[in-house]
Image (cartoon, rainbow, N blue to C red):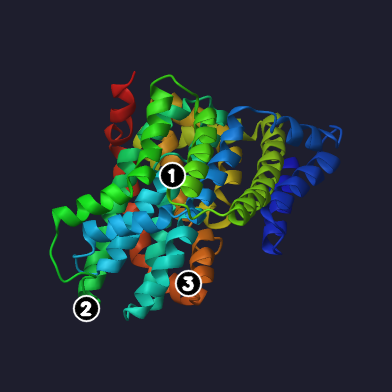
Amino acid sequence: MTVALLFGTLFICLLIGVPIAISLGVSALVAIYFGSTLPLDIITQKAFTSLDSFPLLAIPFFMLAGILMGKGGVSKRLLDLATAMVGWMTGGLSMVTIVACMFFAAISGSGPATVAAIGGFMIPAMVAKKYDGGFAAAVSASAGSIGVIIPPSIPFVLYGVIGSVSVGSLFLAGIIPGLLIGAGLMITSYILSKKNGYKPEQVKKFNFKGVWKATSDAKWALLIPVIILGGIYGGIFSPTEAAVVAVVYALIIGKFVYKELTWQSIFESFREAVIINATTMIIIGLSVSFAYFMTLEQIPNDISGFLTELSSSPVIILIAINILLLIVGMFIDTISALVVLTPILLPIVTAVGVDPIHFGVILVANLAIGFITPPLGVNLFVASSVGKVKFERIVRAIIPFMISMIICLIVITYVPELSLWLPGLFE
């Protein structure tokens, strides 16, 4: 009865378009009121106490750092470097978009932020060069999803806090899978560009001098991931402190090195970060309340028992979990899904021998695909907004890129060395 009330209310709320945070809170409220003797104020208590966490401070600071870098000239220099590296290839602008998104992912930690920063430049540029608008937006939306896999990654921070897993190890674990997904998207883009006759951006072939010059111009931007990961693994600062360092660094290079940050744009960056973080924290708080009630009702144990009875094979269990996560990603945002599902799924996979770090990459890679999967598909809406392209056109064009990401997900799932090799070097 209680389970039916909890999930039935959640489904109805989502069906009528209630925001996900409110849907989770209302579902817990209805289930507690009609199906238990718990006091109703347990929802607000859990929502507030869950946010009293030092590691969670990394989320707003990484958000702010990404916004400051987008406004401070970092995006432009990363685009110039990507153009020098891959602009000579077939479908040059689409290749530039993917590589630039991979670079920006290494400094922003957010999928939508990556789409907004790079897609805002590249979608109009591709359309001006006679690329199909749906294709241009689909490239930006799919490449932007790498923003949550290549470190620093906001979802990795959240998973690490919930699952008591080293955030630094998760950051290292995301590097190779992120590069793999980027390579898969580039291959897909090349095939589609060849088919549609999209020309290289540059007539010249690869030029080492041009790449060196662009690298030199972008050196201050490229130092950011080196500082973050080097500082964490050098024992200089924690992941949370690394996020603060990233903000200070972004302010310095944007204001005094590139000189593109004005006091007005700094104020706007802080305001934007506050608004986005407020939304994020509401989602996290109410998601924790929802997950807490599920734990009290032993729903995670029931799901665990069901999957264990289904099979004791890690292969079969991971297939079932991947299918579940792909479906969940279509309807629930990444943060809510992480908070609700991590306590349920992590004990199941560790019981069958899956490393928690490897599972963190699987979980985030699955939910990254949710960024480009309708009806939620946050990156699709961002790409549609910044590129002035109809949502329906992007949905049709995104299918080949979605297939490419699912193939990469399968490889990441069943080749754990891709995720565990780099963390293993630093143990």
Identify residue for label 3. Answer: 387
Location of residue 77 in the rendering, given as x and y in whole percent from the top left corner: 36, 55
Identify residue for label 1. Answer: 107
In the rendered structure, which disc, 1 or 2, sits on the residue that comes first in sequence? 1
Residue at 43 percent of width and 64 percent of height:
119
Asked if the residue at tag 1 contacts the one at tag 3, i.e. Cβ–Cβ closer than 8 Å, the answer is: no
Q: Is residue 103 above or below residue 135?
A: above
Q: Residues within 10 Å of mark 2 (few under 14, many from 20)?
A: few
**Is residue 250 left or right of 50 when viewed as pictured?**
left
In the rendered structure, which disc, 2 or 3, sits on the residue that comes first in sequence? 2
Q: Marks 3 and 1, Cα distance to the nearest angstrom?
A: 22 Å
Nearest the eye: 34 or 384: 384
- Observer-side mark, 3 or 1, equals 1
**Tag 1: residue type?**
Ile
Residue at 31 percent of width and 55 percent of height:
99
Location of residue 222 in the rendering, given as x and y in whole percent from the top left corner: 35, 43
Nearest the eye: 259 or 95: 259
**Is residue 339 left or right of 229 when viewed as pictured?**
right
Identify residue for label 2. Answer: 197
**Tag 3: residue type?**
Gly
| Residue 306 seen in render | no
Q: Residues within 10 Å of mark 3 (few under 14, many from 20)?
A: many
Q: Residues within 10 Å of mark 1 (few under 14, many from 20)?
A: many
Nearest the eye: 305 or 101: 101
The picture quadrant where one finds residue 13 is bottom right
Q: Is residue 230 above or below residue 278?
A: above
| Residue 247 seen in render | yes
The picture quadrant where one finds residue 152 is top left
Asked if the residue at tag 2 contacts the one at tag 1, i.e. Cβ–Cβ closer than 8 Å, the answer is: no
